[in-house]
Amino acid sequence: MKNILFFVLILSSHFALAQIESQPIVEFEGFDETKEILLDVRTPEEFAAGCINGALNMNWLSNEFNQQVATLDKAKKIYVYCKKGGRSLKSQARLLELGFKNVVDLEGGYDAYSTKK
């Protein structure tokens, strides 16, 4: 039992060091490609049907997701979105686990963004 509590404490402190942030996607005004990355974690089919200009598509459901995001610059702020918000939240947690420090979940996903236009 002590080992489990110790593990939970270590894990929670790891996440506390990373910057966990979110913002409603309807408030997203764009990004600076020199300092930031916009990551769409939907499927390629969803991405092809419509996306936010400048977004990179890396499918959360793909077995290659970890390898794909490993090519991204960890020094840049990453905005992540999906269709409604579930996959982007999971992706944000994974990116933080992989050592990215500044990852912003765009709440509401592309469905909310497309109604804003």
Image (spheres, helix red, strand yellow):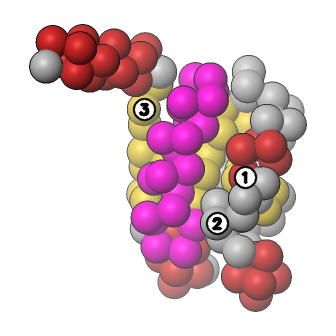
Say which mark, if any, is on residue 20: 3
Q: Residue at x 15, y 12 (%)?
A: 2
Marks 1/2: CA distance? 7 Å
Disc 1 residue type (three-letter):
Phe
Say which element carries label 2.
loop
Residue 81 visible somewhere in the drawing: yes
* Residue 108, image x, y percentages: 43, 68
Marks 3/2: CA distance? 22 Å
Image quarter of residue 36? top right
Q: In which quadrant of the rendered image does the C terminus lie?
A: bottom right
Q: Residue at x 48, y 41 (%)?
A: 93
Disc 2 residue type (three-letter):
Leu
Residue linked to disc 2:
61
Marks 1/3: CA distance? 20 Å
Asked whether the beta carbons under mark 1 and mark 2 sit within 8 Å of each other, the answer is yes
Disc 3 residue type (three-letter):
Ile
Q: Quick one: label 1, few (<14), some, or many (20+) residues within 10 Å?
A: some
Name the foreground residue: 86 vs 64. Answer: 64
* Residue 18, image x, y percentages: 47, 21
Residue linked to disc 1:
65
